[in-house]
Amino acid sequence: MFRSNAKAAESIQDAPLLRALVLTEELPTAQIGVIEGAAAACRIDARLFQKPIDLMRALAAHGADLVLLSAEVARASEVCAAVRRFAGQAVVIGLTQRVDGLSFGEFTGWGGDDLIQGDSQRGLGARLRSIRTDLSRSQGERKSPREREDGRFLVVAPPASEVAASAAVIEQTGHHAVVVATLEEAVTRLGVGRNVRVVIDARMTGALGFVDHALAQSACSGIVLACPPQQVGQMIKRYEGSSDRLIVLDCFSPADAVLLADNQLRISRSNRRTTERLLYSTLVSFREAGNDADHVGYTYDVSGGGIYIRTTAMPVGDRVWLEIVPPGSIKRVRLEGRVAWRTPVTRSGRSPLPVGFGVQITDGSKASMAAWLDGYQSLRARIDGEPEGQQKPARSSLSPALDAAAPEFDPRELPTVRSRPKGGPREVWSSMSSGPSAAYSANGARSAAPS
């Protein structure tokens, strides 16, 4: 299915040049040299820009296949937004001094595709070769910029909330998003809309009443309900009967999770899956089986038997070795897996998954396999609202026992929404800090981590 490295190298030399824009601000001279060398080896025409405004002007005028920049630049989020606005699916790679869960989550939330350590020549080279190969296979089928769709997003959330911030990512991907701060205005807009996808912050007083109203409207094609992680399980149980039109999401997930959740909703009607998978964000080291060097990726979602990894360094072979911290743990485990599928940079705009690959866990030590399954069950139990120590066995179907009457959700009992400090990092609740950023998809549309 995939060519050998030798044939891939030959194809690179025969392929047309790709256009890359590089923002040199905050990049040491040595790193710029590494980028130029790696780009030349992959037949990538790298154009250097010292100021973000100059790069964005070039992007608007001529587009690009690839953009590289320091994730520590003050205007990095603006550059990512400009790429999504003017260059559609161009690949955005960030460079940083040290990759951790918070920085990776923040960069992908801005619209980036991958984040790597700036002095890693091997890591950059692997990513450029993988991108080069994916783009060559696509044979120019990608459109840039991406065409705007008929569907409209109605984002109902306080202006300074994490949910409202998702509107920028929605717009960056070619859709149209309107943010409203009151339920009254939301009802009005829904009443005159067509094919409206609703994203709503469950912490707003009266939010669930609006959700019930929207589900009864033909103009509403789907709802992403964003709530605090401790309320996810309760909301899933409340709306299980509407799982084909509603998906529950942790409101502290990266901003692009809203769009991916909506994509999952749209494919659920024709591709139902029974495997439970939970959004779980943490760093993962991986390498092709038998190789001697690791790459670093970022998990997107997990199940008891698999993991989906965000990365542009796509494995060529089908067997990989992984090192990862299971949910709720501080100790790493080592696992072996089979690459079940790949989502290349040339993916459709309707893909429910970010760039990366899904791994089916096939082997590992007895202790590692047990630790992974225990961590997954613990995460699911917290989301389902079960007491610690009373987790149910792994399930293969989405049929959680429902309480006779789920307790009413009172948003006033929850913490208030805090605005992001100007210039400060966006909060990402990650396993690398206080706990996993997790969401549970009630429809089970597609398992990114096969059981």
Image (cartoon, rainbow, N blue to C red):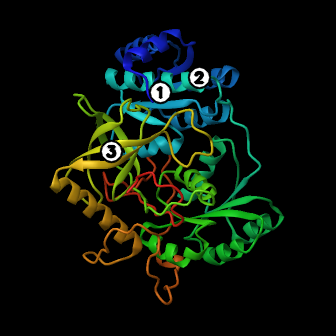
Query: Could you classify mark 1 by the number of other residues whose Cα lies within 10 Å: few (under 14), some (14-19), or many (20 or more)?
Result: many
Pick the residue in front: 442 or 342. 342
> Seen from this angle, which residue lies furthest bottom?
404
Which residue is at a point 56% across and 17% down the rendered structure image?
18
Pick the residue in front: 148 or 402. 402
> Residue 8: percent from the left, percent from the top?
43, 18
Pick the residue in front: 258 or 309. 309
Marks 2 and 1 sit apart, C-alpha to C-alpha, by 10 Å
**Three-letter amino acid code at disc 2?**
Leu
Is the C-beta separation of discs 3 and 1 under 8 Å?
Answer: no
Q: Is residue 431 left or right of residue 355?
A: left
> Seen from this angle, which residue lies furthest front?
1
Query: Could you classify mark 3 by the number of other residues whose Cα lies within 10 Å: few (under 14), some (14-19), or many (20 or more)?
Result: many
Q: Look at mark 1 in the image and give the residue it sits on.
A: 69
Upstream in sequence: badge 3 or badge 2: 2
Is the C-beta separation of discs 2 and 1 under 8 Å?
Answer: yes
Upstream in sequence: badge 3 or badge 1: 1
